Image (spheres, rainbow, N blue to C red):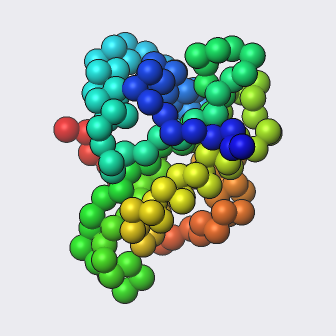
Amino acid sequence: MSLVRRATPDDAAELLRLRQVMIDALPGSDFSTDWHAASLPTLRDRLDADDDFGAFVVDRPERPGALAALVVGTVDYRIGKAENPHGKAGFVFSVATDPDARRRGYARACMEELLQWFRERGAGQVLLTASPDAEPLYAALGFTRTPDPMMGLTL
C-alpha cells in the first residue's frame, strides 16, 4: 500500500501550509501568509474539478488531518518541438516536506506518483525549477539541467 494519495479539497489548507514551508525556504521570500485566505477557495475548486492539476500528498499518521509532504503540478499544452512533438508538458511547481518529516522518502514517493500522473495524461516532458538542496532528488529521478533560464512577471 502506497503512502501517497491524491489530495482532495479537504486538504487545501494543509497544501497552503506546506507550500508556505517551501516558499519560506527560498532566498528573499515574502513570509506573509495573508494570501492564504484568498487562495483557499480557488485551490479547493482546482482540487475538486481540474484534471490538469495534480496534487499528491503523504499524511502525518501522528497528526490526523495534517500532511507530511506534497507535490503539485499541472499539465499544459505548448506548441510541440522535436523532443515533445505533441506539446503536452508537465510542470512541477510545489514540492515540500515538513522539516521534521524529511529524509523518509516522502518527496520522492510523491514525485513518482506525480510523474506517473503526467505520463497518464500524455505529457512528453516535465519541467521544474530546483533548489540546490532538491537537485539530487530530481537528478535521481532522471531530471537534467537545461540551458533555458526561466524568468517571471507578476501581473
Q: Is residue 143 left or right of residue 44?
A: right
Residue 94 showing in the rendered view: no
Residue 62 showing in the rendered view: yes
Give the number of marks. Answer: 0
Q: Residue 135 appears at what percent x and percent y?
A: 66, 55
Q: Nearer the viewer, residue 134 or 72?
A: 72
Q: Residue at x 69, y 14 (%)?
A: 63
Q: Is residue 94 left or right of residue 81?
A: right
Whether residue 48 is situated above or below residue 72 in the rendered picture: above
Q: Residue at x 27, y 67 (%)?
A: 78
Q: Residue 2 appears at what percent x and percent y?
A: 69, 44
- Residue extending farthest to the front is 1
Q: Nearer the viewer, residue 16 or 135?
A: 16
Q: Residue at x 61, y 25 (%)?
A: 67
Q: Is residue 41 left or right of residue 95?
A: left
Q: Nearer the viewer, residue 80 or 122?
A: 122
Q: Locate the N terminus and report the quarter of the image it occupies.
A: top right
Whether residue 142 is situated above or below residue 44 in the rendered picture: below
Whether residue 127 is situated above or below residue 71 in the rendered picture: below
Q: Nearer the viewer, residue 5 or 133?
A: 5
- Residue extending farthest to the bottom is 82
Q: Residue 123 appears at what percent x and percent y?
A: 40, 67
Q: Locate the C terminus and report the quarter of the image it occupies.
A: top left
Q: Residue 98 appears at what percent x and percent y?
A: 67, 27
- Residue extending farthest to the right is 103
Q: Is residue 43 left or right of residue 14?
A: left
